[in-house]
Image (tube, helix red, strand yellow):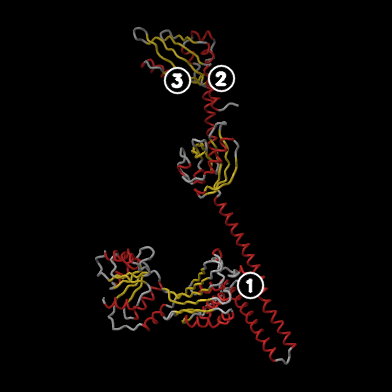
Amino acid sequence: MKTPDQAVSAALAGDAAELASWSVDLKHDCVTTDAAMARLFDMSPESAAQGPVSAYYAKLHPDDVIGHAADIRRAIASGEPYASTLRVRGADGRYRQVLARGEVLYDSSGEPERLRGVVLDITRELSTKAELRDSEERYRTLFEAIDEGVCIIEMLYDPSGKPCDYRFLEMNSAFVQHTGLTDAVGKTVLDMVPRHDRHWFETYGRVASTGEPVRFVNEAKAMNRWFDVYATRVGAADSRKVALLFADITGRKRAEAEAQRVAADLTAADRRKTDFLATLAHELRNPLAPLRSGLQVLRLSRGNPDATARVVDVMERQLGHMVELVDDLLDIARITRGQVALKQAQVDLKSVLDAAIETSLPMIDEHHHRLKVEVAGEALPLFADATRVMQVVNNLLNNAAKYTPRGGTIALVARRDGADAMISVADNGIGIAAESLQEVFGLFNQVGADCNRAHGGLGIGLSLLRSLVELHGGSVVADSAGAGHGSVFTVRLPLDAAAAAEAVLAVAAPAAQMHSVRVLVVDDNRDAADTLSALLELLGHSAQVANDGRAALGAVLDFCPQVVFLDIGMPGINGYDVARAIRNDRRLDQPLLVALTGWGGEADRRRTSDADFDLHLTKPVDLDAIEKMLRSV
């Protein structure tokens, strides 16, 4: 089977056989030709040998006669050769395409005497070119109509003959959509994706060398895409060209991965549910057994006060345990449905902690643990549901007691941390593996699940605890150095800002009456800003709050503060930028700028000084330092 190039060559060879020569005597209007000319113009050899020019014009397409005559006149006038493409009518009435070339010969006096030239039948050549054009157009139309990416690449090899890159030769419009690569023609893939995975070169190089097409799915990590690819060699055995038909299936792969993750989560959730139901049955049977036995003892020991008293104690204890289990189940169900309503009021955290310790102390003593309590001397007021906060602390203490080997140490610490009260419960018990730290607050997960459930429980306590803390606007985190190294659970609850300010004032009586100062407090932590503002107003000053840099600049113009407490680490316009903007504003009576930040190192103080702050105060704010500073204004 001939290739297109071979077909063109054959056509040209056939046309060469139809090359005719001719000569015209201009003075006598006489044409001399060869046999090939007679065949082309469908004339007898006799007529063609000595015929007039008009006999040949009669064989031309009417539309070509005038143009050809004009070409000859121009050639005679200029002395330059001419070439005309003409249509000649054959014996079958059809026109054939010919190319006529000629030149003018002159006599000794310089007058045009003769024309001579050749005529070439180019019908088959033009037909072949038209067919190739049509074929190319069909190919290009099909090429562009495919919605998958299509491209032709040329493999490139290193000196040792290993495929190391490939160059893009052509591609369809969908190529850009599937790869994200633009203007790729003539470029190599490493020009456009420098970290392209080597396995692509090896796969395509194998296709080019063996000629065996492949279909595969693989990831292009450097492009952050997955592709479904069909690759086949183009050309003969020594060709380095490979045609690729491919589709970007990244979305499908991600959907599959997500489906697998969801399936795994559902499987895990189903397993946890099964474990939970088994645990629930176990936990309910535990108190039911002594309750049933106790009833039998009461029947058999009528009139024995000592036996009755012992059994009643056991039954009350086991009934209490069952009530706790049911209460936890009801609480978690209500929280899941969003039906828990907190009964919030101003409470003292210290009194809540005392109640929680009192509740948990019997379990702690039962395991012979040592309890260390460290509570800050200052007031820690909360606006919270005291019962629920006590439930949170009680849960942490009970867990610490359960999961710490006999004779261990439990530490309860409570203190102020900025605008929050921080409560931590630490133990030297069984600890938590690093991979389980993020799972301990999940529903039906147990801290001691690796201990064959020796400590009991439904695995909902920590999930319930976290939900209760978050309902109060707080957070809880778990930390552990690993199995066998104990654990620490830290709860943060927002302090009641107004109550905190009043408490601070109650223990910090000013030494002398101060005059009123206009103070602007700028902090993106709203609680911290509101607390400081309330404190300043209780001290007799006029205070306003701004929670970001843009609001601060507006408040400086409107409020004209004498002092600006300015937080540094704010989103958007930070404290340094606000300070510089204030210093550069000539409309202002420059206020005293006080940097209020959690960063107190020497480098931090240098940065605030460079930004034209007057003072640098470190959080939490010391009341004496504020009073001393405001007296100087």
How far is the residue under mark 1 from the one under mark 3?
106 Å
Where is residue 264 shown, x and y percent of the image?
Answer: 61, 60
User: Could you tell me which secondary element the residue under label 2 belongs to?
Assistant: loop
Name the foreground residue: 449 vs 329.
Answer: 449
Q: Amino acid at mark 1?
A: Ala
Name the foreground residue: 180 vs 436.
Answer: 436
* Mark nearer the viewer, 3 or 2: 3
- Residue at image mark 2: 93
First in sequence: mark 3 vs mark 2: 3
Q: Amino acid at mark 2?
A: Gly
Q: Residues within 10 Å of mark 2 (few under 14, many from 20)?
A: few
Name the foreground residue: 455 vs 574.
Answer: 455
Q: Can you say which quadrant of the picture contains the C terminus?
A: bottom left
Name the foreground residue: 440 vs 536.
Answer: 440
Residue that appears at 46% across and 79% down: 375
Q: Amino acid at mark 3?
A: Ser
Q: Residue furthest right?
A: 300
Residue that appears at 46% across and 39% down: 187
How far is the residue under mark 3 from the one under mark 2?
21 Å
Residue that appears at 55% across and 18% down: 90
Q: Residue furthest front?
A: 407
User: Could you tell me which secondary element the residue under label 1 belongs to?
Assistant: loop
Where is residue 565 shown, x and y percent of the image?
Answer: 33, 71
- Residue at image mark 1: 454
Circles 2 and 1: CB distance less than 8 Å?
no
* Mark nearer the viewer, 2 or 1: 1
372 over 299 or under it: above or below: above
- Which numbered tag is attached to residue 84? 3
